[in-house]
Image (spheres, grey):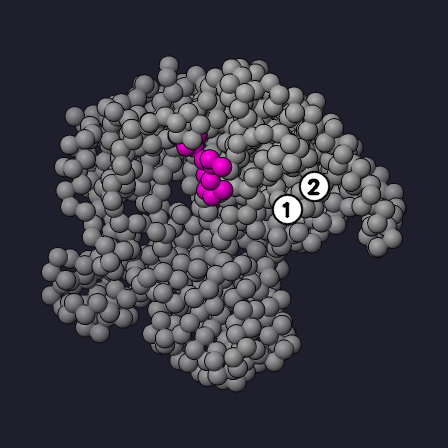
Amino acid sequence: MAEKVIMLGNEAIARGAYEAGVKVSAAYPGTPSTEVSENLVQYKDSLYCEWAPNEKVATEVAIGASISGVRAMAAMKHVGLNVASDPLYTVSYMGVNGGLVLVVADDPGLYSSQNEQDTRMVARAACVPVLEPSDSQEAKDYMKLAFTLSEQFDRPFILRTTTRLAHSQGMVELCDREEPEIKPYVKNIQKTVMMPGMAKERHKEIEKRNLELAEAADTMPVNTVEMNDTKIGVITSGIPYQYVKEALPKASVLKLGMVNPLPEKLIREFASKVETLYIIEELNPVIEEQVKSWGIPAIGKEIFTIQGEYSANMIRKAILHEELNLMAPAEVPNRPPILCPGCPHRSVYYVLKKLKLHAAGDIGCYTLGAVAPLSVVDTCICMGASISSLHGMEKARGKEYIKDWVAVIGDSTFLHTGVNSLMNMVYNQATGTVMILDNSTTGMTGHQDHAATGNTLQGDPTWAIDIPGLCRAMGIKNVIEVNAFDIARLEQVVKEEVAKDEISVIITKTPCVLLDKSKKPLYRAISEKCKKCGMCMKPGCPAMTRNADGTIHIDDTMCTGCGLCENLCKFNAIEMVKAGDR
Amino acid sequence: MAVKSIMIVGVGGQGTLLTSRILGGLAMQGGYEVKLSEVHGMAQRGGSVVTFVRYGEKVAEPIVEEGQADVIIAFERLEALRYAHFLKKDGALIVNDWRIDPMPVVIGTAQYPEHILEDLAKEHKVYKVDATEEARKLGNPRVFNMIVLGIAAQHMDFSKEEWYQVIEHTVPPKTIEINKKAFDIGYTLK
C-alpha cells in the first residue's frame, strides 16, 4: 500500500504539483497560500521555484514556462489574483503549451485579509476553469488533475482553496513523480501574440473550449452524485461539503469538484430526483445564480449568509431547524492581534504618534499600528496604496495639507507595488514623506525572503536590491536611513523631512525581532523608583502590565530587550538585568 | 469509536500549533483518520488562537463545532473562558492557570475577568495547573504546554509510550528530554 502521511492542504497542493511533474513555480507570499511554495521548495532537485516580487510577475513567469513547454504554476491569495488579473484574462485567450495552474486561496471569514472576494467570480469573468478540493487528499489529486485537464483542453486552470482547507491537515496517500515530456515549442503567433486580430479569433475559440469543458464536466469523476434519501438534495463543493456530510448524513449530495464551468445536464438530472434542492456554498452565490438561471428551483442565500465561514451547526439550524441548545459564549475582552514585543514598528509608531502625524498605511504587520494605543495608521487599502494614496491627498489638497501625513510601507510591500507608486510621486512632483519600515523580511506571512534580502526561495545567496539606492536612482534627493529604535534621531529626521517641500524617503532598517536569533537583553521595572507616569506604557508593549499599585511589571517570558521602555523612562525606573549580544 | 474532538486554545506564540500537531501525529499512529485545523498569518501575532484536532474511524469536517468538544486544552485562563461553550456535556477543560493581558486590558479599556476558574468549575469539569511555574522549575518556561498536554493525555486513549514516540518526532531534537519530563509532570498530576 502507498505511504500515507498527514499534510496541510497547502502541503498537499505542493505534493500534487511535484507528482504532476511541475518544472517551474513562482509566487508572492500571502496568507493562506504561502505554505504552497514553502513546501514546494523541498523538491528543488526536481523543479524550480521562486518568490516573485508580486503575483502579476509570478503569473507571467509561469506563463512563460508553460509557453516553453513545461508544466508550470503560480500561487497566490485571492487579492493577489487581482494583481495577476491582467495576465490572467489574456492567458485565458492564449491557452497553454505545458499545463498551467494558478493556485488561488480565498479567505472566507477574513482571517488575514482586507476583503472577502470570491475567486470563482473572477474565474467566470476570465473564462478560466476552476477545480475545488474539499480535503488534503483531494488537494493533491485535483492539482494533478488540473495539469492533465489544462493540457487536454488547452486552458489555464485555477485550483481554488479557502483558508480552512489550506490550513487544515488531513491524510494523504503519496505517489511517485511523473516526468511528462517537455512539449516542443512551435512558433504560432495566432495563439501567443494577443493583438486584436488574433485575440478576436482566440475569443471564439475559448468560448468553444468552455462549452466542451462544460459538457465533459457532466461525466467528470470529480463531480460526484451520492444518492440517499431524496427529500433533501444538496449541491455543494469544497470545505462546505464536509459540513454537509456532518449535518445531513442522510441527504443526497451532488459534490462538484469542478466549479467552473458547471455540469448543467448533471445538475438538471440531480435536481429532478430530489424534493427540495439546496445549494450550499461559502461567499457568493456563484453556483446558485447559474442553477436558478436555468429555471431550476433551489434554496441558497435565502437561508445562508454571503459572509464568513459555514459550519455543520449552521446547516442543521437552517435546513433541519434543529434546536441546538448551545451554551451562550461568555462575555470576555477581545484579544486582537498585536505587534510582537520588541517589534521595530512599535518604536516608529511611537514617534509618529508623538509628532501627531497621520499615516497612510499598507499591507503587513505594520497595519496593526491602526489600533489603540498606537492609533497612527489611518488607511489600509491594498499592496502599495500607502504611497499612491498619500500622493492623491496632496494633489487634492495641496502640499501643506500633507505636512501632517506620512506613508508607511514595509520592504516587501514596497518591492511588490509600492515602487511604482513612488515613481509616480517623483514623476508628478510630489512633496510627501514615505517611510519604508524595512525589517528585512516578508513578516506577516511568516518570514519569506524577497528581492532585497539576499536569499532566494531555494536558499541560494543572491544580489540584494539596495532599497536606498533604488530610491536615489529614481531621483529622490532626501533618502535617509535610521535605526527604528533610535527614537531621538528618528523624531528629528521625521520632523525635518515632513517640513520640506520635496519628496523624502525615510528607511527604518531594523530586522524583525522574530528573525533576530542573538541573545536578547532582559529588562525589569524597579517599583521603588517608578513614578507611575505611564510613559513606558504608551507604545503598548504586550510584555508590560501595571501592578495593582500602578507600578509596572515586565513579563520576563515575553520581553525581548528592545530597550524602548528604558529609553522612555525619565526616572531610571527600568533597568537591564541581563545583557544580550547587542 | 465515535469521533473525538479536541481544541487547543491560547495566545498566538504559545505553541498551540505544535501541540495540535503532536496530537494529530499520535492519533494517526493509532490508526485513526485525523483532521486538524490551524491558524496562520495575522491572527498569530499575539491574538486569540484556536486549533482543532478530530480523530476517529471517519472524519468529515476539520473543525470542532460549539457544544461538541470532548477536551479543551487552554494555555491561558481568559482563552479557556472564551471557548468553554464549545465543550460538550461532561467534556474536560484543562487550563494553564496563567494570565496574559490582551491589549484592551493593558490600555485600560476592558477588565480582565476575576475568578475565571471558579466560574468555569460551576459548569464544567476543570483541571487546572500552574504549568508555566512548573516549567520554570524544570529550567524552561516554554515547555509549559507539554505539562498541560500531559494532563490532557489522562483523558485520551493512548499509552505513555505512544505519547513519548510522537513527542520525539515532533519537538526539536535538543529539547526532547525536557519535553518528556514536562509531559510526565502533567501525566502523573492528580
Residue depicted at x 53% and y 28%: A278
What is the three-letter code of the residue carrying label 2? Val
Most foreground residue, B87 or B166 = B87
Residue under numbered circle 2:
A128
Q: Main secondary structure of the magenta part?
A: loop
- Judging by the rendered image, the residue that carries numbered circle 1 is A122
- On the rendered structure, is A84 left or right of A307? right
Check the residue under mark 2 and report the chain it is in. A
- Residue at image location 69% in from the left, 25% down from the top: A265
Labelled pair 2, 1 in contact (Cβ < 8 Å): no
Q: Position of residue B184 (x, y in %)?
A: 25, 28
The residue range painted magenta reads A302-315
Q: Amino acid at mark 1?
A: Val
Secondary structure of the residue carrying numbered label 1: helix
Within the image, what quadrant is residue B138 found in?
A: top left
The span from disc 2 to disc 1 (Cα, nearest Å) is: 8 Å
Q: Position of A39 compared to A324: left or right?
A: right
